[in-house]
Amino acid sequence: CCMHATPNYRRMVGNPICRQISWGEDAALVAAWREGRTGYPWIDAAMTQLRREGWIHHLARHAVACFLTRGDLWQSWETGAAVFEEYLLDADEAINFGNWMWLSCSCFFYQYFRCYSPVAFPQKYDKQGAYVRHWLPQLARLPAKYIYEPWKAPIAVQKEAGCIIGVDYPKPIVDHQVVSKENMGKMAEAYAAHKAGKAGGGPAAGNGKQAAAAGKQAA
């Protein structure tokens, strides 16, 4: 088991297999994510199910983990792993912390330019938003066109659906299209620093290509 062979497996600092990344520390962002108040229905529905049932599908786990860390909120994977450890009925220490390192691109998986979109990803698999309508009933009457981006619904549509964005359901706490690209840049810098450190302080070759690809491949 990787966990038993790795010192400080549950945290970043002192963990020899984990990339050292300067994550943010914003309690308000973490609380909004944990409590399903991000303003992104797919993320909020998944976190609501997690709190109520102690389980979510593995793709939902991937999406909310990416959103909290490198995708949108830029918060530490350690924080997310602790929340999962608290709520998941099937929590396994080695798998849980390993998966969080993986989804944050801190270890095991390094294609940080591949990012789960909280809008485009669920649109592929649940076009009508049945999952969101179930877990977030305040959005249940919204047309499918706006179910993953309710803030784009005209006010007349919001009134007809009985859900005013900013009142009955929160506005997005970040702009995914903006922060996802910014975070890819931060990841590129962290990876460059890691590579330079391994090379004894030499320049990080090839990093520019990854950074350039990041903006093009954001979901």
Image (cartoon, rainbow, N blue to C red):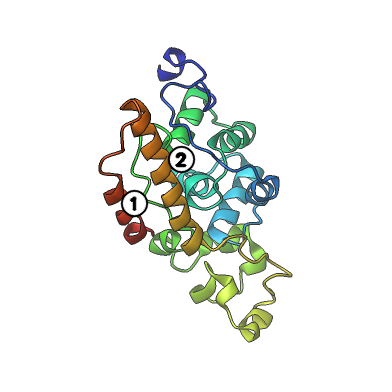
Q: Can residue 88 be spotted in the picture?
A: no
Residue 5 % position (x, y) = 42, 13
The quarter of the picture where the N terminus appears is: top left
Q: Amino acid at mark 1?
A: Ala
* Mark 1 crowd level (few <14, some 14–19, many ≥20, 10 Å Cα): some
* Mark 2 crowd level (few <14, some 14–19, many ≥20, 10 Å Cα): many
Q: Is residue 92 above or below residue 204?
A: above
Residue at position x 52%, y 66% in the image: 148
Residue at position x 38%, y 32% in the image: 194
Horizontally, is 206 left or right of 22 in the view? left
Q: Report helix, strand or loop for mark 1.
A: helix
**Residue at the farthest right position:** 167
Residue 110 % position (x, y) = 35, 39
Question: Which residue is at the front of the view, 132 or 181?
Answer: 181
Q: Is residue 129 above or below residue 7?
A: below
Residue at position x 51%, y 20% in the image: 14
**Residue at the farthest top position:** 5
Which residue is identified by label 2? 104
**Residue at the farthest bottom position:** 156
Q: Report helix, strand or loop for mark 2.
A: loop
Residue 170 % position (x, y) = 67, 64
Q: Nearer the viewer, mark 2 or mark 1?
A: 1
Tag shown at residue 107: none
**Label 2, label 1: how many angstroms apart (C-alpha)?**
17 Å
Horizontally, is 128 left or right of 34 in the view? left
Which residue is identified by label 1? 211
Question: Which residue is at the front of the view, 18 or 31?
Answer: 18
Horizontally, is 174 left or right of 187 in the view? right
Number of callouts: 2
Residue at position x 26%, y 40% in the image: 205
Q: Amino acid at mark 2?
A: Ser
